Image (cartoon, rainbow, N blue to C red):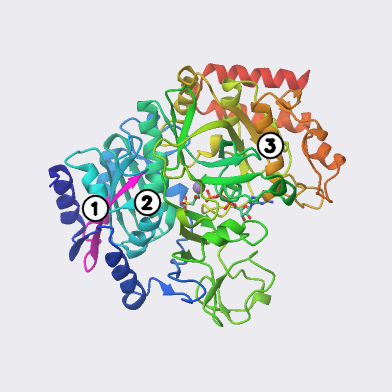
Amino acid sequence: MNKVLMNWIDEMEALTQPDQIVWIDGSREQIEEITRQAVEETHELERLNPEKLPNCYLHRSALNDVARVEEKTFICTKRKEDAGPTNNWMDPAACYEKLGKLFQGSMRGRTMYVIPYSMGIVGSPFAKIGMELTDSRYVVLNMDIMTRIGKPVLDALGDSADFVRGLHSKAELSNEDRYICHFPEDNTIWSINSGYGGNVLLGKKCFALRIASHLGRQEGWMAEHMLILGIEDPKGEVKYIAAAFPSACGKTNLAMLIPPALYREKGYKVWCVGDDIAWLRVGPDGRLWAINPEAGFFGVAPGTNEKTNPNALGTVQRDTIFTNVALNLDDNTVWWEGLDNEPPKNALNWKGESWDPASGEPGAHPNSRFTARAIHCPCISREFENPMGVPISAIIFGGRRAKTAPLVYQSRNWQNGVFVGSIMASETTAAATGAVGVVRRDPMAMLPFCGYNMGDYFSHWLEMETKITNPPKIFNVNWFRLDEERRFIWPGYGDNLRVLLWILERCEGKADAVETPIGFLPRPEDINIEGLPDVSLDTMRELLKVDSQLWREEVNSVRSFYEQFEGRIPSVLLRELDTLESAINR
Ligand code: GTP
Ligand code: SPV
Ligand code: MN
C-alpha cells in the first residue's frame, strides 16, 4: 500500500467525515452499481430510452451551478506575483484554513469515492496520475468517461508520491461558498460547493491545464487548451494540427469536422485526436508532439446537429451523460436548441419544468453538455491511444470576433506567433458564469486556465523555441465575423477545412500569401470557395479585410493588457507590439 496516499486519504477522511469510503476499481460491475444508485436511489440521473439511447442518462444540476465560476477560482501560490494579475490569488495557508472549515464534516451521511485516474495512457512516460476524492456519484461516472480510472492506475502509481491530490465535495452546493482552489506548489486541488463539470471533474481544467501548465513550465513542456486533429490527404498522408480557441468557440466542432462533399469525393478525411486539451512535448526529431490526456468529450450540446457536427451526434448515441438538456417526454430522449427545428411538444426544460417551446425560454441551458467516450467517435484517430502522440505541423489560435480578426492569417515566425497568441481576444460565452458576448483578451485561450503568472507563461512559450528545432507554423483564424445584419459571413463547420488546407499548404511552402501589418494573409482567390453558393470573391475580400482603425484600437487594448504584468511581460513581445503599431500606421 502507498503510505503517502493512505495518509492523505486518512487526513481528508478525518476532515470531511464520510460515512464510508469506496475505492473505484474501474470494473464495469462497480460502475453499473453506482449508476443504478444514481438512478434509483438518489435520482442524480434519469435513464433515457434504452432502445434509442442505450446506457444514456440525463442529469440536471442545481439551478445556480451551470458553468465554471472564474471569480471563485483561485491559484494559491506562496507569492502572489507567481499567480499573476489575471488569476485570483489566496495565500495557501489562508486558503487551506478557509476551505478546511467548509470541508469540515461536508461528507457526513455520504460516501467518499476514491478515484485513481490517469491523464494520458496509463503507464506511458507522458501520462500523469491524479487521485480525486469526491462525494458525488455524478463525478465518479463522468470521470469514468473522461479519464482512465481504477486499479491499473493504482498499479502504475505504486508507492510513488507523485500524484495530484484532488478533493471535491458538493457540500451544500452553496453559491456563496463555492471555491475552486489550486495549490500548484503542493500538487493539490480543492473544490467545494459545486457539481458542474469544469469545477468538479478535477482531471480536466484543474489538473490537465492549471496544475499541468505549472508542471510543464518546470519540466519543459506545454499544457494547452487545444484540440488536436489529423487531416488525411487523398494519398493517405496525415498531417496534424493543434488549435486553441476559448471555451465554446468551436474546438469540438473543428476536431470532428466532416470535409465538404467535394473534398470527401477526392479522398480527404479528418481524424479527431482530442477536442479540448493538448499536452505538447518536443520529440527526439525536434518536432512538437501532442497527446490528448483525456479519454472522453465534455462537449457543448446546443448547436450540435446532423449538419454542424454529425460525428458528435454519432458519439452521443450510447454510454453518454447529458447535463442540463431538455427531456422529450414522448420517447424519453433529449433535445437542445439547434438539434433540429422540431422542439418536442411534450417536454421538460433543463430545470425539469414542463416547457412550451413557444414560451421564448430555452429548453436546454446554453452551456448544457454531453459527456461521451472518445472511442465512440466515428472519426477517432488511430493515434488516439498512441502514448507518444502525434507530430504537429501547425498551431492555430482563434476566437469569436465580430470584426477585427480576419478569417485567417499566418504569423511570421515562432516569436511573432507567440505574440499573435498573446494578443488573442474573444467574446465571452455561456461556458463561464457572467456576461455573454463581451470581448475580452484571452491569450492562447488560456486566460481562465493558466496556473501561474501569464507573463511567465509567455516567456515559457518563447523559450520553447530553443528546444523545438523543427517548429510548427503558427496561424490565427476567426470563423465568427459578422455582417451588418449580425449574421455569420463565413459558413464555418465542415467548410473550415478549406482554410485548414491553405494552412497546411503554407506549412509546405506551396501556397501564396500577401504580407500585411498583422502577418501573411491568403489572397481572396487562395481559399477554395467551389461549391459555396453564398460565398463570392467579394465575400472573401470582406472576410480577409484588415481594418487599420480597428487594429489601432486593438493595439491600445493589448498595450493596457500587457501593462498589468509590469516587469513580467517579455520585452520581445513589447517590441512585437511596437512593430505592429508602426506597421499599421505606415
Ligand atoms: P469548450 O468545450 O467550452 O472548450 O468549447 P469548444 O471550443 O469545444 O466549442 P464547441 O465546438 O462546442 O462550439 C461551441 C459553439 O460554437 C457551438 O454552439 C457550435 O455550434 C458553435 N460553432 C462551432 N464551430 C463553428 C463555426 O465554424 N461557425 C459558427 N458560426 N459556429 C460554430
Ligand atoms: C470549457 O469551459 O472550456 C470546457 C468545459 O471545456 S469545462 O470542463 O466546464 O471547463
Ligand atoms: Mn474547454
User: Which stretch is magenta?
Assistant: 99-119
* Amino acid at pointer 3: Leu
Tag 2's secondary structure? Answer: loop
Residue at 56%, 40% in the rendered image:
230
Mark 2 lies on residue: 147
Instruction: Reply above or below: 108 against 282.
Output: below
Please provide percent x and percent y for residue 531.
81, 49
Decide if residue 111 is on the left or right side of residue 416: left
Mark 3 to mark 1 CA distance (whole Å): 43 Å
Mark closer to the chain start, 3 or 1: 1
Picture quadrant where residue 159 is located? top left
Tag 3's secondary structure? Answer: helix
Q: Is residue 89 among what the camera can see?
A: no
Q: Residues within 10 Å of mark 2 (few under 14, many from 20)?
A: many
Mark 3 lies on residue: 501
Residue at 68%, 23% in the rendered image:
509
Q: Is mark 1 within 8 Å of ligand 2?
A: no
Which mark's residue is nearer the viewer, 3 or 2? 3
Mark closer to the chain start, 3 or 2: 2
- Marks 1 & 2, CB-CB < 8 Å contact: no
Instruction: Reply above or below: 514 against 203.
Output: above
* Amino acid at pointer 1: Lys
Q: Is residue 353 among what the camera can see?
A: yes
Q: Quadrant of the C terminus?
A: top right
Tag 1's secondary structure? Answer: helix
Instruction: Reply above or below: 77 against 74.
Output: above
The residue closer to the viewer here, 64 or 414, is: 414
